[in-house]
């Protein structure tokens, strides 16, 4: 079969249906970004599904295999999908870390005593991901209608969740980090000074009303200083924003909207102005920011099949996407539009694309690849993404994979008791969460405190010729496999994203 290079539904090497996606059908696959593999198989007689996933990394005739044993609780099981029942496996991007590697992907599905389906994609190809660095300004001040608008903690929550959504939408590698020097995150951001958007004295020293040119210059001045400083910090685009004022004008309060200054700007010179927040039950900051940033990098381009809405120049003419397999990597579920809703094209306005809100928009496939090509050319990105290794790079590859897999809990199939030590009165079981200790023994107990369920998994792996595999053990989950838990919002988890920038102290 041909190599897999795009998100979509395919027949594997054995003629079985598989879905491979990074969000929307037609997206070019990019390295180091979350990906879903869905295996279409009969689950009617399967009680407890386990999947063995084996990734083979190849470069210049040299290969390394890594295997995961994935329990039911870490799988996306669907019995009502458009193509029948299926099992989904979600991988973190670092399982496919480099665009210069070749990948072979195998899956074995265990649970049906009558058969063990085997799926194989002999060649999956990824392209180089981009990286985007944003400087964000909060817009404050006394509005002409009398409201004193000042940043609050709710602004931080709104922007952080919008950046998480934007990160999942863009063709950049996994990771959202605070600071402009990180090379291991696809979307980096920092906050600049708050800007009085209705100053009593204009930047030029005159009285209001201030000219558009001097206010644009004010919003871009800190970006220009950073980019001219000669340090590792760099800004690719500037975002100045505030939530809408729900108290004016009545009824219903202020509207939402945005503006890009200017269309298809040289890197570092573009400004996205955003008035977002919640309106009519939908979150607008994320999609407006996504559209205006898209404009800064040339969306909607003239060579796009979606160019252009005759009533709205430089915007997509198509309201939405018709892919029934579109997957939301922010909420970790397939898109499920509400009644009369759809998955909107974020570059469309008048057809309702943008209006579907933060959790129901995507870039179209043409725009995804257009942005990827732009992002990989931004200053510093190519150097940070790595280059194709020479023939002497085998040791480097092994070292790189060791960084990916070094913390994964491993099991040696011939002697699983080394990773599953005996404990008096307890036995190890294979459960929906992986290997777990439980009091007593359910069913027949075998060697070294290992239950029959563990022996069954061990025997299955042995029959498949697997000598070593990674699997969740106790409270140690698999890092490379994403557990499909419901999304945890910002105010219910730690601010671990706020690692300070590498090689530079916090700016004052």
Image (cartoon, helix red, strand yellow):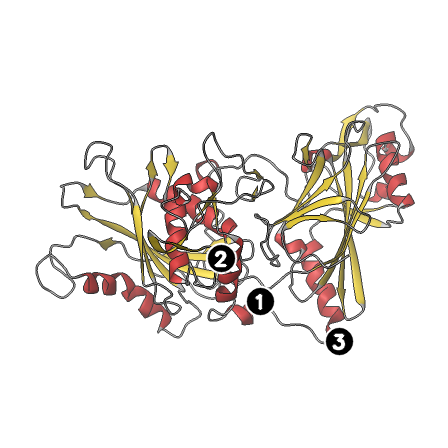
Say what secondary structure mark 1 lies in.
Answer: helix
Q: Is residue 387 left or right of residue 64?
A: left
Residue 190's x, y, as percent?
39, 57
Q: Is residue 431 above or below residue 417?
A: above
Residue 204's x, y, as percent?
14, 66
Identify the disc placed on residue 305.
Answer: 2
Q: Can you tell which of label 2 and label 1 is closer to the viewer? A: 2
User: Which of the two labelled residues, at mark 3 and mark 1, occupies the earlier sequence position?
Assistant: 1
Q: Quadrant of residue 146?
A: top left
Q: Is residue 277 visible?
A: yes
Say what secondary structure mark 3 lies in.
Answer: helix
Q: Can you tell which of label 3 and label 2 is closer to the viewer? A: 2
Identify the disc placed on residue 391.
Answer: 3
- In front here: 355 or 449? 355
Residue 176's x, y, as percent?
49, 53
In the rendered view of the protein, which quadrant contains the C terminus?
bottom left
- In front here: 116 or 14? 14
Q: Residue at x 89, y 27 (%)?
A: 445
Alpha carbons under labels 3 and 1: distance apart: 19 Å
Q: Is residue 159 visible?
A: no
Alpha carbons under labels 3 and 2: distance apart: 41 Å
Q: Is residue 456 left or right of residue 228?
A: right
Q: Is residue 334 left or right of residue 247?
A: right
Q: Is residue 358 above or below residue 258?
A: above
**Residue tagged by mark 1?**
385
- In front here: 301 or 224? 301
Q: Residue at x 83, y 40 (%)?
A: 117
User: Which of the two labelled residues, at mark 2 and mark 1, occupies the earlier sequence position?
Assistant: 2
Q: Is residue 187 left or right of residue 436?
A: left
Q: Is residue 302 above or below residue 359?
A: below
Alpha carbons under labels 2 and 1: distance apart: 30 Å
């Amino acid at each position: 079969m041909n190599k897999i290079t795009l998100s979509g539904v395919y027949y594997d090497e054995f003629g079985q249906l598989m879905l491979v996606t990074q969000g929307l059908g037609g997206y070019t696959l990019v390295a180091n970004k979350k990906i879903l593999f869905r295996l279409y198989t009969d689950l009617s007689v399967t009680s407890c599904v386990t999947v063995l996933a084996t990734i083979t990394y190849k470069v210049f005739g040299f290969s390394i295999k890594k295997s995961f044993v994935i329990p039911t609780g870490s799988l996306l099981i669907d019995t009502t999908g458009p193509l029948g029942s299926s099992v989904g496996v979600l991988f973190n991007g670092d399982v496919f870390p480099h665009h210069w590697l070749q990948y072979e992907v195998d899956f074995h599905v265990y649970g049906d005593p009558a058969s063990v389906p085997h799926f194989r994609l002999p060649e999956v190809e990824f392209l180089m991901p981009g990286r985007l660095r944003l400087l964000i300004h909060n817009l404050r001040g006394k509005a002409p209608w009398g409201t004193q608008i000042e940043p609050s903690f709710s602004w931080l929550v709104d922007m952080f969740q919008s950046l998480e959504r934007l990160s999942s939408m863009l063709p950049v590698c996994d990771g959202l980090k605070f600071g402009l020097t990180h090379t291991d995150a696809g979307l980096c951001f920092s906050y600049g000074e708050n800007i009085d958007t209705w100053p009593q004295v204009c930047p030029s020293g005159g009285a209001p009303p201030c000219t558009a040119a001097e206010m644009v210059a004010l919003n871009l001045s800190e970006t220009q200083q950073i980019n001219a400083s000669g340090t590792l910090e760099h800004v690719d685009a500037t975002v100045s924003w505030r939530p809408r004022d729900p108290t004016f004008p009545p009824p219903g309060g202020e509207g939402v909207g945005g503006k890009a200054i200017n269309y298809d700007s040289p890197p570092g010179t573009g400004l996205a102005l955003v008035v977002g927040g919640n309106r009519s039950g939908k979150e607008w900051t994320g999609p407006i920011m996504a559209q205006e940033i898209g404009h800064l990098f040339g969306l909607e381009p003239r060579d796009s099949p979606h160019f252009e809405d005759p009533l709205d120049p430089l915007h997509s003419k198509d309201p939405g996407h018709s892919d029934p397999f579109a997957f939301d990597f922010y909420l970790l579920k397939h898109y499920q539009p509400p009644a009369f809703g759809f998955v909107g094209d974020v570059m469309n306005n008048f057809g309702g694309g943008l209006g579907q809100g933060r959790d129901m928009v995507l870039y179209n496939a043409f725009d995804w690849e257009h942005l990827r090509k732009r992002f990989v050319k931004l200053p510093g990105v190519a150097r940070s993404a790595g280059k194709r290794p020479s023939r002497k790079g085998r040791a480097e590859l092994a070292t790189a994979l060791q960084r990916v897999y070094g913390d994964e809990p491993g099991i040696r199939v011939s002697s699983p008791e080394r990773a599953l030590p005996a404990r008096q009165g307890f036995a190890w079981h294979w459960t929906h969460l992986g290997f777990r200790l439980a009091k007593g023994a359910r069913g027949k107990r075998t060697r070294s405190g290992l239950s029959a369920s563990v022996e069954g998994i061990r025997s299955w792996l042995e029959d498949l010729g697997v000598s070593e595999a990674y699997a969740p053990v106790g409270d140690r989950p698999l890092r490379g496999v994403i557990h499909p838990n419901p999304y945890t919002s910002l105010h219910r988890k730690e601010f671990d994203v706020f690692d300070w920038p590498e090689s530079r102290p916090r700016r004052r």
